[in-house]
């Protein structure tokens, strides 16, 4: 779990973590991308988007219509955009110079999934603010923990 100014926390369920991994694997060798939505730091929705980057092998750009649709759904459901996720199919789970230059949402967490070792994917999370990279911890709830989780994340 990580804390940021304002005390925000990011918590994923196993189900949501698996959804991100499945999306990343399905899009490989291209990068996958999407949004993390929820409330009070609990991710309740994984919103996959189409990557329309000129070279999706080494970058991502969310389809503008997907992004608008997702932002509208987040607002209609009274949720918050907690983060943005994308994959690095053949590189580490660390922001590239392109990732840093395209970090347009300073309030968001940027989660990166590396598939370099396909049998052992790695996910790391970062704050990307003013060309600075700060790693943040996050929590994935163990399977069976749903009984004790927030109603928003169940």
Image (cartoon, grey):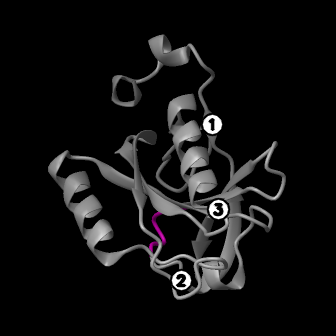
Name the residue rendered at 71%, 60% in the picture: 135
Q: Quadrant of the C terminus?
A: top left
Res 58 → quadrant? bottom right
Residue on which disc 1 sits: 139
Q: Is residue 106 magenta?
A: yes
- 114 lies left or right of 57: right
In the displayed structure, 150 sits above or below 34; it is: above
Residue 28: give its label: 3
Residue range (magenta): 105-109
- Cα–Cα gap, marks 3 and 2: 21 Å
- 149 lies left or right of 133: left
Of residue 14 and residue 106, the one placed in the foreground of this image is 14
Q: Among all residues in the image, which is located at the extreme left?
A: 76
Name the secondary structure under disc 2.
loop
Between circles 1 and 2, the one closer to the viewer is: 2
Number of residues whose C-alpha sits closer than 10 Å to that of mark 1, classed few (under 14), some (14–19) or many (20 or more): some
Residue 102: give its label: 2
Q: Give how far across and how far down residue 129 sits, in percent.
A: 57, 76
Name the secondary structure under disc 1.
strand
Name the residue rendered at 81%, 59% in the picture: 116
Name the secondary structure under disc 3.
loop
Number of residues whose C-alpha sits closer than 10 Å to that of mark 2, classed few (under 14), some (14–19) or many (20 or more): few
Q: Give how far across and how far down residue 91 sits, in percent.
A: 79, 68
Q: Give how far across and how far down residue 75 sits, in percent.
A: 20, 55
Name the residue rendered at 47%, 78% in the picture: 61
């Amino acid at each position: 779990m990580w804390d940021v100014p304002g005390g925000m926390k990011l918590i994923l369920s196993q189900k949501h973590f698996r959804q991100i991994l499945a999306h990343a694997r399905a899009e490989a060798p291209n990068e996958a991308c999407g949004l993390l939505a929820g409330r009070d730091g609990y991710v309740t929705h994984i919103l996959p988007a189409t990557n329309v980057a000129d070279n999706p092998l080494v970058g991502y750009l969310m389809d503008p219509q997907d992004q608008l649709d997702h932002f509208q759904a987040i607002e209609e459901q009274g949720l918050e955009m907690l983060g943005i996720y994308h994959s690095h199919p053949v590189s580490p789970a660390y922001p590239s110079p392109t990732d840093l230059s395209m970090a347009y949402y300073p309030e968001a967490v940027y989660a990166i999934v590396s598939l370099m070792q396909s049998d052992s994917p790695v996910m790391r999370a970062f704050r990307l603010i003013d060309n600075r990279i700060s790693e943040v911890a996050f929590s994935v709830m163990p399977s069976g923990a749903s009984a004790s989780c927030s109603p928003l994340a169940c």
